[in-house]
Amino acid sequence: MVATTISEIEAENPSAFSVSVIMQKSPSESTWLDDCWEAVGILASADVNRRVNQAVQLIHQEGAVYRYLYAGFTLRLHVDECESYYYNLVSSQPRCYVVANQDDQGRPEPFLISLSFDEAHAYLEGDETVYAVPVPAELYRWTEAFLLAHYVPQKRTKRKRADWKSTAARGDHEI
């Protein structure tokens, strides 16, 4: 059955997703760095009550390339970020943003997953490392349903400029 009202759409969708990040470590081509880290994927589950091992786990190794699973994140959507979610979804390549700190050895330690470009950009301005990965299909559908239920585009209006030539705008000051 297809949901037809906003309350039906909200009832069918989970309020949060349990998310894990796959980070890849590979040898760096730079003479200044030993390793190059990048986020290569996101795994999502609607079961946020499931207990997850939050320790970093090696899940794949091929030669000098290692993939690690960072689990235990919860992704929630917020009504005040709807416009950012909307522009993310309608872009040519929708992205999930992984925000991470660097530890003493230069390894990333992800601490936030977001679908909001504005939130990711704010962390980027604060000198945090932000990785962009493709949005998994289930997160795309979930965000799309959230936007249908909550997003109302605001009509943009131009500001009216003051007429600087009129005497009222500049005042009648005699020198």
Image: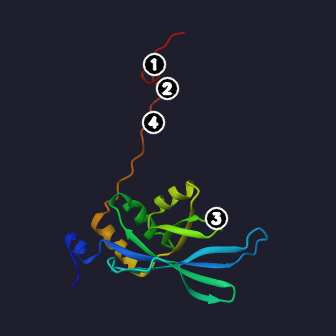
Which residue lies most toward the bottom here? Answer: 62
Residue at the (44%, 32%) spot, across then down: 162
Q: How is the image coloured?
A: rainbow
From what the image shows, is residue 61 above or below residue 4? below
Badge 3 or badge 2: first in the primary sequence: 3
Amino acid found under the numbered disc labelled 2: Lys
Foreground tag (2 vs 1): 1
Q: Quadrant of the N terminus?
A: bottom left
Q: Secondary structure at mark 3?
A: loop
Foreground tag (1 vs 3): 3
Marks 4 and 2, how far apart at CA: 11 Å
Amino acid found under the numbered disc labelled 1: Gly
Task: Characterize the local packing of mark 1: few (<14), some (14-19) or many (20 or more) Cα atoms within 10 angstroms.
Answer: few
Amino acid found under the numbered disc labelled 3: Asp
Marks 2 and 1, how far apart at CA: 10 Å
Residue closest to the eye, 64 or 51 = 51
Task: Characterize the local packing of mark 2: few (<14), some (14-19) or many (20 or more) Cα atoms within 10 angstroms.
Answer: few
Task: Quickly name the residue at label 3.
Answer: 104
Can residue 140 be seen in this snapshot? Answer: no
Task: Quickly name the residue at label 4.
Answer: 161
